[in-house]
Structures are given as structure tokens and as C-alpha cells.
Image (spheres, helix red, strand yellow):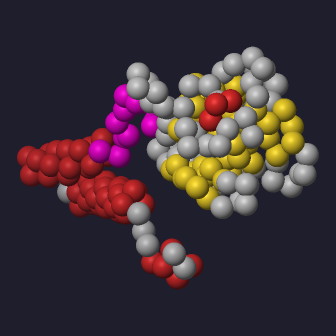
């Protein structure tokens, strides 16, 4: 969306806020007008007649009604919905020895997933059965969790047999047991020498 489009686009919430401000300005104007008319009635009528009291009562009621509308209503505090936090990581791709994508998985909308191998009794989210190293991969080998806008990886077995090559580093780091590792886009995760590109 270009800057001109952003300037022209007004959200429904902004429109509602503007509408409420306009209504408050009208209410204030009516209150001030009613007060001015009451002052005029008091100054104009020198004798206290029934007409004066009726007019004063009518305009005082009008002014009071619109003054009360200006008092903000006490709202019950409802917990605000937490804003949806999106990750810059959108998927995972299994690479062959030449770096070609063999299989891909979309992570959109997920908050937790298991990496391993499907069996007839259990399915995992990221199935590495097609890997050349599938004999070295456990049914539930690793766990990925999404928290605070980031994906984290941890092994489910000791030793985990998982290493990570960070995007701007040439060294492969072995995953420490019981310590989640933050993933970044472009990292390569090695699960029993099966390469997974974090996209």
C-alpha cells in the first residue's frame, strides 16, 4: 500500500472516534446555547411570571440532558485481545545434498509442531521419512514452539542429534539438551544430517 493510499485509508475505528468527537462538539454547543438562553430569560423578564419559570425549566432540562451525555459512561473493563504476533519465518524446506528443495511445510497459523517420522500409529507435523537419513531419525525427534514472535527448536531425545548453522555463520552448532534455540530465517537445521532450511 503506497503512502497516498495510506493517507486516504481511514480505519473503521478512526471513523468511529471522529464521529464521537463530532457528537461531543454538538452536545457542548447545545449545553452552551441552553445556558445562554437561560441567562437571556433571566435578564429579559423583570417580573417573575409563570412563563419565565416554564422557559427556564425547559431550557435548563435541555442543557442538563446534554451535559449528562458528555459525562463518559463507566465501561466494564474487558481484557483487550492480544495482538496477533506474526513471525518472519513462514516455512521449512527439506534440502537434498545439492541444496534443492525436496519437501516444504508452511508454518502459518501454527504455534507448535513435532519434527520426526510418521508411523502407522502416529503422524508428526514435519515428516522426514523421505530423508536419506530416516533410519537415524526418531519418530518424535524435535519440537518447535512459537513464542513472543519467534520460533524455538529443542530436541526430544538425549543426545538430540540436532545441530544448527546460523544464517551468517559457517559453523554448525550442536543443540544443547533441554535448552531451546531461537531460529532465524535462513538458518539450516540438521536433524541426523537431514538439512532443513528455515524460510
Q: Is residue 190 above or below residue 175?
A: below
Residue 81 in the image: state x and y as whole percent.
45, 37
Residue located at (51% from left, 50% from top): 106
Q: Is residue 136 visible?
A: yes
Residue 150 in the image: state x and y as whole percent.
66, 41
Res. 85 image quadrant: top right
Q: Is residue 82 visible?
A: no
Res. 162 image quadrant: top right
Q: How many marks?
A: 0
Taking the image as shown, residue 15 lies to the left or right of residue 30, namely right
Residue located at (57% from left, 79% from top): 3
The reply to whether the magenta stretch includes residue 128 is no
Taking the image as shown, residue 157 lies to the left or right of residue 84, namely right
Residue 44 in the image: state x and y as whole percent.
24, 61
Q: Is residue 190 above or below residue 96?
A: above
Magenta stretch, residue numbers: 69-82
Residue located at (73% from left, 35% from top): 192
**As rendered, which of 66 and 5 lies closer to the eye?**
5
Res. 99 image quadrant: bottom right
**As rendered, which of 81 and 52 lies closer to the eye?**
81
Residue located at (55% from left, 52% from top): 103
Residue extending furthest left? 50
Residue extending furthest bottom? 4
- Magenta stretch, main secondary structure, is loop
**As rendered, which of 36 and 114 lies closer to the eye?**
114
Amino acid at each position: 500500500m503506497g503512502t497516498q493510499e495510506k493517507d486516504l485509508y481511514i480505519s473503521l475505528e478512526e471513523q468511529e472516534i471522529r464521529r464521537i468527537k463530532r457528537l461531543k462538539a454538538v452536545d457542548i454547543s447545545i449545553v452552551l446555547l441552553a445556558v445562554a438562553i437561560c441567562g437571556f430569560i433571566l435578564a429579559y423578564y423583570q417580573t417573575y411570571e409563570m412563563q419565565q419559570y416554564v422557559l427556564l425549566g425547559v431550557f435548563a432540562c435541555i442543557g442538563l440532558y446534554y451535559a449528562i451525555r458528555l459525562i463518559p459512561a463507566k465501561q466494564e473493563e474487558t481484557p483487550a485481545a492480544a495482538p496477533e504476533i506474526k513471525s518472519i519465518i513462514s516455512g521449512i524446506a527439506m534440502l537434498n545434498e545439492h541444496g534443492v528443495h525436496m519437501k516444504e511445510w508452511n508454518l502459518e497459523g501454527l504455534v507448535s509442531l513435532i519434527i520426526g517420522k510418521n508411523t502407522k500409529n502416529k503422524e508428526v507435523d514435519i515428516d522426514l521419512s523421505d530423508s536419506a537419513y530416516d533410519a537415524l531419525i526418531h519418530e518424535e525427534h524435535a519440537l518447535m514452539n512459537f513464542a513472543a514472535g519467534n520460533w524455538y527448536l529443542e530436541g526430544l531425545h538425549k543426545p538430540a542429534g540436532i545441530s544448527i548453522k546460523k544464517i551468517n555463520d559457517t559453523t554448525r552448532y550442536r543443540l544443547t539438551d533441554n535448552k531451546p534455540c531461537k531460529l532465524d530465517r535462513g538458518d539450516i537445521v540438521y536433524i541426523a544430517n537431514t538439512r532443513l532450511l528455515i524460510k
